[in-house]
Image: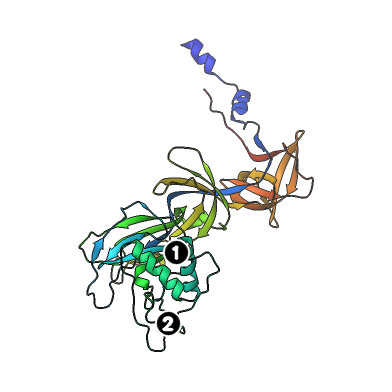
Amino acid sequence: MTWWLAGQARTPQQLAAEAKAPPRSVITVPVRFETLVRTATLDCRAEPSSVVPVPLAAGEGQGDPVVTALPVKNGHLIGEGRVLVEVSGRPVIVLAGRLPAYRDILPGARGPDVEQLQAALVRLGLLPARRPSGTFDERTRQAVARLYRDHGYPAPGAAPPAGGGTEERDPRSPAAGVTMPRRELLVLPRLPARLGKVATAVGEPARTGDVVVQSGRVVLRCAVPDESAVHGLRRGAPATVTPPAGRALPARVDRIGPAVRNDPPAGQGSPAPDDEPGDEPGREVTLRAGSSLKAGTGYQARIEVEKAAAKGPVVPSSALWSLPGGRTVVKVVRAGRRLEVEVEPGFEVDGQVAISTPAGALAGGDQVLVSAWTVREEPP
């Protein structure tokens, strides 16, 4: 016991040495030269770029519209000239074009919608290949009559209104009164399209929205859960999208939707903090990624939100030292010496900061001080 006590004894000099702070420990990191990029990761779903509810209506004197035939199955492709659905015994025919059907086209009518109809009839081989006249003339009416006849329907016909049309017509012509009713025409900007929804059946009332067509190229629609995550995002920004299985695909931001606040209905719920109603604004970002996307599939997208103007020095935020007068410096350690270099901080990504410095002030591989502290060792 005596020998143990003797071993624990300390002289005043030993006690003072043990209580003395150890030398300051210096930690440095190398300066990296790179282009700092801030990205956002979003969950996306591949969907057609255009979703069109099909208007379903009956003609005058036919009563309430009823679905009488569904010749296209849900999920199947629809080509030009195809009958999509039959309402009260009359077809809805699909054609390609930029303008939606906005009026009944009567004999002698003129306009871009007539020119568009003529172009479709040429593609279907029902009109000679020539420059469309833009007039719903006898030749065009005969082509429309053939289109209906090929599908087993009588051509629609109606006497023109008083003063309507400018063409002198022969009432003995079999196509004299042929028209193109808008309720029997569905014009889509891109074909083939796909029947995306059928929420009705033969014999049921025909309601707009029960039949939905999906057209256009497949795009990625991405939900933005945090508005700050995409602050600074621009159209055309590059992205990488990854399917559940398979290789990553390059993509580009095609559209940045407006922020939409999800307010509760009047009289329901409680006001948000600071008297701001509803939840945080939601936003949708649309990406284009070539022709390899599969509709209905979920993808994860990594989008470039913000990028430094050029390649330059990047340091951790802990390497920035604030000095009196609003100056910011990094402390470069070279050959055991410390050199203060004044910098201008740029944007920060995950604790890394892009900085601007005088030309030649920093070089790749320079070590900058991030911390200096004293580590006190406890006695055993």
Q: Nearer the viewer, residue 77 or 269?
A: 77
- Measuring from the top left, give residue 118's x and y in whole percent: 48, 69
In the drawing, what numbered circle is on residue 169?
A: 2
Give the residue pinned by disc 1.
126
Q: Nearer the viewer, residue 325 or 121?
A: 121
> As displayed, is residue 135 above or below residue 127?
below
- Measuring from the top left, give residue 253's x and y in whole percent: 54, 54
Task: Say if mark 1 contacts mark 2, CB within 8 Å.
Answer: no
**In the structure shown, which secondary structural element does the residue marked by tag 2 occupy?**
loop
User: Does residue 321 appear left or right of residue 378 in this picture?
Assistant: right
Q: Amino acid at mark 2?
A: Arg
The structure residue drawn at horizontal position 57% and vertical position 32%, both measured from the top left corner, is: 376
Q: How is the protein colored in the picture?
A: rainbow
The structure residue drawn at horizontal position 53% and vertical position 25%, both measured from the top left corner, is: 379
> As displayed, is residue 265 above or below residue 329?
below
> As displayed, is residue 377 above or below residue 273?
above
User: Does residue 157 appear left or right of residue 50 in this picture?
Assistant: left
**In the structure shown, which secondary structural element does the residue marked by tag 1 occupy?**
loop
Residue at the farthest left position: 203
Q: Using a 10 Å C-alpha cutoff, classify the residue at mark 1 as few (fewer than 14 neighbours), some (14 to 19) or many (20 or more).
A: some
